[in-house]
Amino acid sequence: MSRRKLDHYRFSAEAQNVIEAGKPLYTQIKGNWNEFYFKNDNPLVLELACGKGEYTVGLSTHFPDKNFIGMDLKGDRIARGSQLASERNLHNVAFLRAGIQYSHEFFAPNEVSEIWLIHPDPQVRARDEAKRLTNLRYLNDYAAFLKPDGKFCLKTDSTFLYDYTLETIEKSGAYRIVEHTADLYNSHLLDDHFGVTTHYERIFTAKGYTIKYINAIVL
């Protein structure tokens, strides 16, 4: 492991805005995000597979009246988002280091108002469907802790994942698709993103890929 990664892991272990195994809130936070961490009643917005937390931090600056949680397993990535949030003195941001498959262990029913999934690995091979973060199992998990009319949003460069997710949302019966587009940058929906992009999104668009977007709500 590189020295840089080790430094990031140490940062996460010490950072107050990172919740991970070994810290008290890790086993206490489910159903208690507002009370134990944020100390307010503002809506919870969850970014799954947040990577470096670019969306979590970016949106939090536009919505100081919402609480943002970035969730990812990679501690070195989370450390970067954690540090950026600390440098910007953002008190409405937290990071959770855990696998997405365990999300139901950290969020109680009806606790989350919005979920954002930004450029996840599309896992295109058929044998890897269980890893796709928009398969039926995951979508049902998300619906369980989203509030009624809670929002689920996907942003992706992958046509495969875009089409797959549209089909899977319909199959789930737990959501209603509000709007979607296969070309976000040439859509009125672009304004919903407040100019927030990720490193990979900038790479994809520079290569000529269009960005797809789905906005659905829980029934």
Image: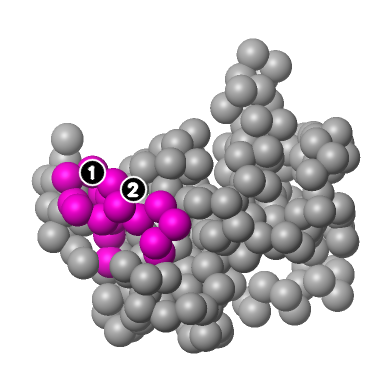
Which residues, given as a range, are shown in magenta?
A: 17-33
Picture residue at 61% right of the left edge, 23% below the top: 130
> Is 70 one of the magenta-colored residues?
no
Above/below status of 165 relative to 111: above
Q: Is residue 153 visible?
A: no
x and y, in percent, of residue 207 in the image: 67, 52
Note whether 161 is above or below 61 in the view shown.
above
The answer to which image quadrant residue 217 occupies is bottom right
Find numbered disc 1 in the image and state the secondary structure of the residue it sits on. loop
Neighbor class of circle 1 (other Cα within 10 Å; few <14, some 14-19, many 20+) is: few
Specify the amino acid type for callout 1.
Ala
> Mark 2 highlights which residue?
97
Looking at the image, residue 210 lies above or below residue 81: above
- Dot 2 surroundings within 10 Å: few (below 14), some, or many (20 or more)? many
Name, please, the residue furthest toward the top: 127
What label does residue 21 carry, if any? Answer: 1
N-term-proximal mark, 2 vs 1: 1
- Which percent across, then down, holds residue 126? 70, 16
Is residue 26 in the magenta section?
yes
